[in-house]
Image (cartoon, grey):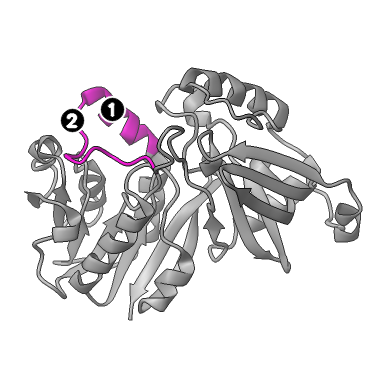
Amino acid sequence: MNYYDTDKEYSYEEMEEIEKEIYNKTFFSNNEKSDLDFNSIFAREILVFKDRDYHLPQNIFIIKNYKGRTIVGRKIRSILSIENRINAINCSMITAPMLLGILKNRQKNNRKITIEYFPFTNAEKKSIFDELKTNRKYDIYYPYKYRFFATNKEEVSPEEGWSFNPNRKEYLGYGEIHLRSYTNQYFKSFDLTKKNIYDPACSTGEFLSDFKKIHTSCHTIGHDLSQEMIDYAKDYVDESCCCNAINSPLENDSVDIMFLRFLNSEVVSTFSAYQILKELLPKMKKNSKIICFGHTPVLIKKKWLEKHNLNVLSCNGYDDVRNAIFQYYVLEVK
């Protein structure tokens, strides 16, 4: 799978064609489960996967502490992309074919990434995934960020925020179907009467609107950097404001649930993600909940969350429609 082991900068169209080839070689729709024999796995020839940080390094993920081992995987083309429901190659969902094997070593020298691993069979991938999807404590970690070829800087959203585009709205909605469904399922037994529900980067506001259809007595607050987004979102939330999340005007100790859907790769820089969260934490009440997820990898590390007075209740979510897991951090403010 060393399709990207080259100094060349690929265009999006070229990467899309490469990803189609990777998908065709990697995907399996069903497979018999297999008992795990780690001695057998470790006896196999070590495989090496290489990439550059200006190709698709954000597709590489790590899952630690699986029976004392570390699993390495790489996303392949999303079913949502195949169905033309999103305008991106990948989405937040991870499925069984994306598991590669047991990590032996990984390193990044300059801009070159090298992953060494003991490979799984497809039957082993099925068995391991069937266990992963039942445990919300497994942390899905993405160690590498995409960086521009010329500048070596992380990709971020425009300073003025995203402009409103009806076509983009549809793509964002499709990419969130599994996230909205899981959110509604997770909170279905919560009594949120008169609770303040805050989204500091609410986009179209439809995520909060969908949430309020179930919790009709809660109070939704949507902020966004883009005035165009807020002009649209104001009809979908109870309270709206165009502002930067790092300068949120909300009072301290005022929020019961905060949805963070933007502290993600290719949205904000890693440095900004931590700075923004630090500024938002005082807005939360004691025992309140913070939910962190997104279309692209979350930039905040679990260890950082635990060090900042947050109890990590959950690290991932599961969608039974697509049989996929995804990052979904549920944090309780101590």
Q: Is residue 96 magenta?
A: no
Quadrant into which the N terminus falls: top right
The Cα atoms of the two marked residues, 2 and 1, are separated by: 8 Å
When the figure is inspected, residue 147 is found, relative to residue 85, above or below; the finding is: below
Of residues 231 and 217, the one nearer the viewer is 231
Indicate the amino acid at tag 1.
Arg
Give the side of residue 109 with respect to residue 231, left or right.
Answer: right
Look at the numbered discs 2 and 1 and tell me whether their residues touch, using CB distance below 8 Å: yes
Give residue 73's position: percent from left, percent from top: 65, 46
Indicate the amino acid at tag 2.
Phe
For the residue carrying disc 2, how many other residues have a C-alpha within 10 Å: few (<14), some (14-19), or many (20+)? some
Give residue 71's position: percent from left, percent from top: 68, 55
Write the residue at 57% across / 19% down: 17
The answer to whether residue 218 is visible is: no
Give residue 66's position: percent from left, percent from top: 69, 64
Quadrant into which the C terminus falls: bottom left
In which image quadrant can residue 216 be found? bottom left
Q: Residue 168 carries which label?
A: 1
Write the residue at 40% across / 28% down: 86
The answer to whether residue 120 is visible is: yes
For the residue carrying disc 1, how many other residues have a C-alpha within 10 Å: few (<14), some (14-19), or many (20+)? some
Bounds of the magenta segment: 154-175
In which image quadrant can residue 113 be found? top right
Write the residue at 32% across / 65% down: 290
Query: Which element type, helix, strand or loop, lies under badge 2?
Result: loop
Query: Which element type, helix, strand or loop, lies under badge 1?
Result: helix
Label 2: which residue? 164
Write the residue at 30% across / 56% down: 272
Give residue 47's position: percent from left, percent from top: 79, 43
Q: Residue 304 carries which label?
A: none
Number of residue marks? 2
